[in-house]
Every structure is written in structure tokens, then in C-alpha cells.
Image (cartoon, grey):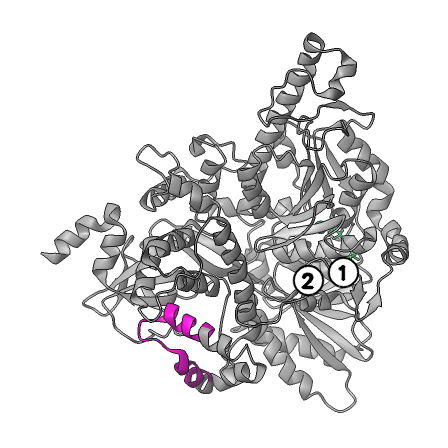
Amino acid sequence: FPDSEPLKEPLVHGKKNGGKRIDYKAQAQRLRAQRQALPIYSARQAIIQKITDNPTVIIVGETGSGKTTQIPQYLLESGFTVKGQTTIAVTQPRRVAATSIAKRVAEEVGTPLGGRVGYTIRFEDCSSAYTQLRFCTDGLLLREILADPLLRRYSVVVLDEAHERTLRTDILLGMLKDIQRERARVARLNRDAVPETAEPDHRSRGTHMKFDNSGDQGTSGVGDSGTRVVDETHGDVTGLDDLRIVVMSATLDAERFSEYFDNAPILYVAGRQFPVSTYYTTTPQADYLDSAHLAALQIHMETPSDSGDILVFLAGQEDIENVERLLVESAANLPNGAPALLPCPIFAALPQAQQSKVFDPAPEFTRKVILATNIAETSLTIPGIRHVVDSGVHKVRGFDPRVGESLLVEPISKSSARQRTGRAGREAAGFCYRLYTEADYAQLAEDSVPEIKRCQLSMVVLQLKASGVRDVLKFDFMDRPSKKALKHALLELYALDALDDLGELTKLGKWMAEFPLEPTYAKVIYASVSAGCTREAIDIVSLLSVDSLFYVPADKRDESNAAQMAFRSSEGDHLTYLNLLRAFNKVNGDKIWCQEHFVNRRNVKHVLDVRQQLNRLCTRLGIDTELSCGTDLANVLRCFLAGFFHNCALLQPDGTYRSLNGSQIVHIHPASSLFGKKTPAIFFDQLVFTNKLHARAVSAVDAVWIAQAAPKLYGRMLATSQK
Ligand code: ADP
Ligand code: MG
């Protein structure tokens, strides 16, 4: 870190742990019995056989049956990879799941994390040339296709949590289907070509004709397991073999996946489930955060502390932090003699060490309350849970062409509610407290709508384009997004100059696709190069990657606001955040200082991580990341408009703000430094829908800049308004 921030622990967790050497083999030995006790263990042979015999297999198994942690290991043990050459990828929709599952599997395999088993997520790589089992996010694998169009380094891709139907899972399904077909075709051509060009025993010399465009590569034959046997004399991945796809889902409706993959076989794995008593509230709850806090406290006080831990489902990081704060306070004021209460939050921006705390057994006479989002619904199985508190909500992305994308907190589906309930009955009979009425439950939708049908598509359309999909309207989607949404994305990319008049990817578009960011942010960084403020642009983009930089305790709202004033910029939140980061760096993130200023220290530390990764990526692309505009910060805001011209609103004579692209009324979020101020034009980072549309992270700009940033869209508007 440039600001003398001490480096965190090395990514490859070495042999030391508090000075002690870890005996990995012994650890794996200890976990072996646990592995063999999992329901999936008895199906091991059948699973391997099915995957050997079929290019694609769908596996359905109840949450906790062992799909995620075991099946990749079975493949590893059965020779589906070749050391140093091919890898098995296991994708997860969420970063936290990818990292914590990799950690667990490395322990079970008996190697240090980052060795044989590793993970790669956005902004963090914990894998090496030796990695044979790589856990990653689905978004990350999608980006790898840009560099490796046939994903040749992978012999198997396991698409986990497919039932969640996240946007990226859906796109990945389509891409993988295509890659599988292409690799099978190339492999067939190569096999067919062999007899005409060379004697079979020359095959391993690689002398026969190749149809593969990647240069000098070894060839392969089909081994007895049906998987690749690679010519050891050639160091490169052959890439000639078929790609195996394993789709894993926790819900029973697997036929859709099977149909999509040409009637691929479905394997059902039985789970183990104890009965769970479910309770509803008698009246609707006005504030689910308060109710969640009270419910957890009540369970703790009214049931023996050795009757299992509590898992609370909430909508997002902010919710989790709020309930955590309430619980910490209550935990400090428990009656004498009562067992201790230990809140354990888990979300992506939390450092690894704290994330893994949720898996550690609670100390004696202490009960854990795990505060989680959907992630604990099916992705992670946390041992020891007997009580579940279900808020009934989750956070989803919503898209309306008139307003763009917004985040909303919405009721979950029945299917989610059932999954949440099930988490209480994994080890023994359990209890589930739903913070809504039974009548409300009856009103819930059966299933959630796949994300692809309700969110902004510009980032994935850019990725599809950059991966060589020319006509995205004809892409083989499992669930087709609306034409309107696709066209909207194409138009947005056109306005960003990522696509040209013919809809072809531009050089800039290709460049933007390199970034693991929404195209809007990539465009900001691009604009900052010629404006000479790359350093500030990267700082602010990193700052916007976390949910909240400050915390506002309910009982100290005024003090918190007063403390934030120290960083306030009259131009709005973007520069306010920048001021905060500069001040934070000056004091080296001092803990007391953060407390006094109500600064969310762990989130700002996460910002520093993101910034470091973005700096690295930019440096690789030949960008000088130290280009700074010093105090002339207006330039930075103009750069933001180069990406965010869609997220603008103008002040109306009646005092409201209306969005430029859809004339919707938007309100400045109460947490914004511009709240209550009237400036003629604003742009914002995000829209959040609660009871009305709120713009978050807002800055004041000159209306003329907006038009200059997007002449294709607003040039005419500007001309008329200036008349
Ligand atoms: P599935 O993918 O079918 O939902 P998993 O493979 O994630 O199941 O989990 C299998 C079992 O492994 C769980 O029941 C849990 O007991 C155990 N397990 C998984 N992760 C951890 C962990 N980090 N610490 C301890 N136990 C774990
Ligand atoms: Mg799983």
C-alpha cells in the first residue's frame, strides 16, 4: 500500500498459523470421517460414472448434502484433471461462497489454500500454477472467456447454485453450451484427421494436422475414464478434448436445465432433514430490523444456550450491520448469569478472517447469532444452526428502461422461505421464526424471477460482444430477456462509445470489457486518462464499490451527521468520499479516529483492496495510475459524467428532480451530502427504491457538461435549453 498500510496476510496461506506449522495431511485425515458421513458419499461412484459417460450432467441435491464440497473432490480424485495442465472450475454466484468453500475444500484435501485447491474472485486471486480445483465467481469465469475463448485450461466446469439463476449464471450457461459444442467439434475433427496424416503412434508427437487455432499443442486421446489423456511431452493444455459440464441445483425443478442441455441426465441426491417447527407473527411487522433483533434476543433468553445457534436472514450488508449493532448493545446488557451472545455477520466486504469466524464453534457458554443474506440460504452451510429467523426479504436488482437499474428490498419467494426454514433442521429438529404473517406467506410468489429478466444488461452484453457473440439478440438464452432490455443495453453501449454505428465492438469497448466493472465505471477511468485525474477516478470508483462508508447508529444520528460534516464537499458525495479516503489515509485508518468520525473502517479497508487491484489492472493496461489533478476536482466530476450521463436529473420549477432519460421523479437520499440542497443538475451512482426512488451518491454538476458528455443523447436537448 502506498499509504504505509501494512499488507494483509499473504494470499497463499502459508504453513504458519500463529507460529505453529499446520499438518495439512493430518487435518484432512481428521475430516475424512465427516466427508464419508455426508449423504452424497454413497452416490460417489454413480456420480463419477455419469459424468464420465455424459458431456453434461445435472445434479440435484438438498442443501447440505455435500454437492459443492464433495463433487469437485470426487472429480479431482478420479483423474479429471492433469496436474499443471487442466483445472476444474467450480463457479459460485457470490464471492463469499467461493472463498469460504475453497478454504474448506483445501482443508479436506489437505493442502494449503492456493495450492492444489484455490479460488479466484474479482479483485483477488488465490490460486497458482498448481491449482487443479479452482473456485470462482460465475462473473470471473465469464471474463476468462475473453482471454481464453474455449476455456481450454478447464477440463470440467461445475456450475453451482444454478437454481439461483443469477444474470451471470444464465449467461455462463449459454456460453458454456457453445464452448462445449465447439470443443467437441474441434476434437472430432482432430480425431478424424489423424489417420490421413500420420500413423497413430505419431499422434503424441503432435505431427498431425490440427484444426485448432492456438498454435503448437499436444494432442490427446480418450482414456479409459473417458477423460483426457494428455501428451506429457507438450507443456501446453491441449484443449482438444470435450468440456464436461456439471450443473448443480438445490431445487427440484431441474428439467429446465436438462432440456437446455439436450436432455442431459439428472441425478438426484437424497438429503437429510429433521423436522422444523415454523412460527409466524400474528401481525405484520413495521420494522423487520427491530423485529429480527428482538426475535434473536428472545430465542436466546427463552431457550437453553446449548440448544443451537441462531441464523438470521436479512436483505443486505447495511441491514446486517444495523442488527449487529443492536445485538452488540443487547449482548452487553444481558442479565447476570445469562449465557453470552456473539453476533457473527457475514457479507462480501468482510475480511476473510472474520468471514470464517461464522464457521468456528462458539466459545463455551456463548451462543452465536449469524447475520447473513441469501448467501446462507443454499450456498453456505453453517454447522450448529437450530434456530432460523427469517425477515422475509432480500435485495434484488430491478430494471425499468425509464429509470435504469435500481436496488430494491423485496419479499422473498415461497421457495426461498422453505430453503431458509430448512437450514434449522440440518443436524436435529429445529425452529423457524418467520417475521411475517401466515397470510403474507400465502401471498408470496412460488419462485423468484430469473435475474436476467429484471436487470440491466449492458455489462453482460458488452462481455458477450467481447467474447465474439455478434448478434446478442440471437444468443441461446435459457430464459430470454426482453428485446426491449437487450436493445436498451445495446443503446447504452453505443452511447458509451463501446459499440459503433453498426453495433460492432469498438476499440474502446474492447478495452472497457477488460475491467471487472460495469461499463460506466470503465468509461470513467478511460476519460480520466486524458483529463489527468486517474488517481482520483480510481479512488472514487473504489469508494463506490462498498455499501456504506459511514455508519449511523439510530441513537446517535446527529452526532454521526456532525462528524461527517468534516469531510463534506459542497459538490456532493463523490468528492466527500474522496475527502474521507484522504483523511483516512492520513491517519492510517486509525481505529479510534474511525470511531470518532463514524467511519466504517472495515469497508474503507475493503476500498483500499479494491483500489490496489484496479491500480494493478490499469498498470497492466499501460495507464499511469498516479496521474492526479490535485485540487482541481471539477475535472473528476466531468470524467464521471462520461460514464454516468444516464444517471442524471435536473431540478424542476416545482423543486423536484426528474431523471433526464425517463422523466421520473427521483429524490436525493437522506444520507447524501446534497440532501435538502437545490442545485440545477445532479448525477448519481445508484437508484434505490424503498417507498420512493432515492438517488444515492449524488454530485452537483453543470448541465452543459452532461450534454457534452453524451452529445449523441443530449446534444439536441442542450441546444434547445440554451435558446
Ligand atoms: P451442498 O453444496 O450440497 O449444499 P456442501 O458441500 O456445501 O453441501 O456442505 C456439505 C457439508 O459440509 C455441510 O453439511 C457442512 O456440515 C459441511 N461444511 C461445509 N462447509 C463447511 C465449513 N466451512 N466448516 C465446517 N463444515 C462445513
Ligand atoms: Mg452447495
The three-letter amino acid code for the residue at tag 1 is Gly
> Which of the 4 quarters of the picture holds residue 178?
top right
As for residue 580 lying within the magenta part, the answer is yes
- Name the dominant secondary structure of the magenta segment: helix
Task: Check disc 2 and report the residue beneath it.
Answer: 10
C-alpha gap between disc 2 and disc 1? 8 Å
Left or right: residue 145 compared with residue 227 = left
Which residue shows up at 18% across the image and 52% down it? 717
Closer to the camera in the image, 446 or 136: 136
Observer able to see residue 543: yes
Which residue shows up at 47% across the image and 53% down it? 618
Circles 2, 1 touching at the beta carbon (< 8 Å): yes
As for residue 56 lying within the magenta part, the answer is no
- Could you say whether the residue bearing mark 1 is in a helix, strand or loop? loop
Tell me where residue 148 appears, x and y as whole percent.
58, 36
Q: Which residues are magenta?
A: 560-581
